[in-house]
Image (cartoon, grey):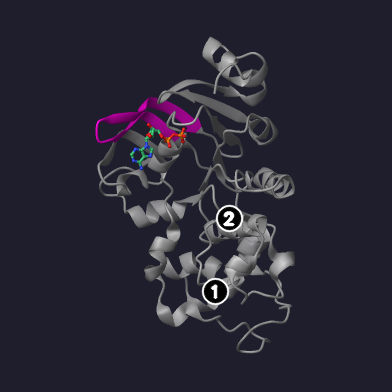
Amino acid sequence: MNYNPSDDVNVVDPEEKTMPRIPGQAESPVTTATSQAPSEAATALEEMHATRHVRLRDLHAYYESNHAVKGVNLVFEPGKVTAIIGPSGCGKSTMVRCVNRMHEEIPGARSEGQVLLDDVDLHDANVDVITVRRLVGMVFQKPNPFPTMSIFNNVAAGLRFTGTPRDEISDRVNAALTGAGLWDEVQGRLSAPGMSLSGGQQQRLCIARALAVEPDVLLMDEPCSALDPVATLRIEELIAQLKERVTIAVVTHNMQQAGRVADTTAFMLNGELVEVGPTEKMFTNPDDERTEQYVTGKFG
Ligand code: ADP
């Protein structure tokens, strides 16, 4: 099941659903290119460095009696992209949804074990789930801009929700769009609907939305599977840039993609982590025979 953040749209103050005024621009509608260069916020985003480890310790996840993730121990290292591969239904999405606590939103679902962000257990009852979602952003298989919102407001939504002062929002939105490699393509039409963008642009818009709140970790669940090859390449290039700033884990069923983007690859089968290692080793000389069979296409 794919979580759709547009379900959360009611968290946005209705008053804020209009384009905030950007100095030097017509009040509304904003149709001309803004000359406002991404400034302090952009610098802050550029200067972000991935520093945080995510450590899964004996993680189990269940849907009622279906034991979907079975005792996974895995580390997502900062500055590196970790790809999670494995056949459909092996628990990849469930595992990453445990990291930002989306799994617990599903009726009948529960998890056990630890998800540590450095030394903080994100599953600890004292840790606020809103904080977890700010620290751990997520991008989904199908681009899911908020359907009724402009490009600007799509990116601003999370900022408003997390209480960013109004006078910082424009800068932060611009910085996030720049960070997601979308600024040059949309700067003249920030008030256009997010849904008016192409599929690849919508996915970068969703990445901008995730980046805007300056997360430490970005989880991507099959982020390119709905995109054409050109848009896919653009997202893969972006992932390579973003890994310097945020710790990244990418679920993919596309082994070529894992080979292109990932420093580390983890192979799952039937809810278990079979093997994890440097991507090149996983594809050329894995330790486990099941990994070898999977990466050579003998099943999957
Ligand atoms: P993958 O991402 O590797 O394709 P999933 O994590 O989606 O695998 O699924 C792992 C197992 O959990 C499967 O048996 C699947 O049917 C089950 N599952 C996934 N999502 C749900 C859900 N929302 N409700 C019940 N069972 C689910």
Left or right: residue 88 compared with residue 232: left
For the magenta stretch, what is the residue range? Answer: 55-75
Ligand 1 neighbours mark 1 (CB distance < 8 Å): no
Q: Report the residue marked by disc 1.
A: 168
Residue drawn 41% across and 23% down? 270
- Picture quadrant of residue 262: top right
Q: Earlier in the sequence, mark 1 or mark 2?
A: 1
Residue drawn 57% across and 36% down? 252
Give the image quadrant in which the ligand numbered 1 is located. top left
Q: Secondary structure at mark 1?
A: helix
Label ID, residue 207: 2
Q: Secondary structure at mark 2?
A: helix
Q: Is residue 204 above or below residue 224?
A: below
Residue drawn 57% across and 47% down? 246
**Residue 280, how many percent across, how many down?**
67, 22
Residue drawn 62% across and 86% down? 29
The C terminus, quarter of image: top right
SS assignment for the magenta stretch, majority: strand
**Residue 288, how many percent across, how many down?**
53, 12
The question of residue 56 being in magenta is answered with yes
**Residue 231, how many percent across, how many down?**
70, 50
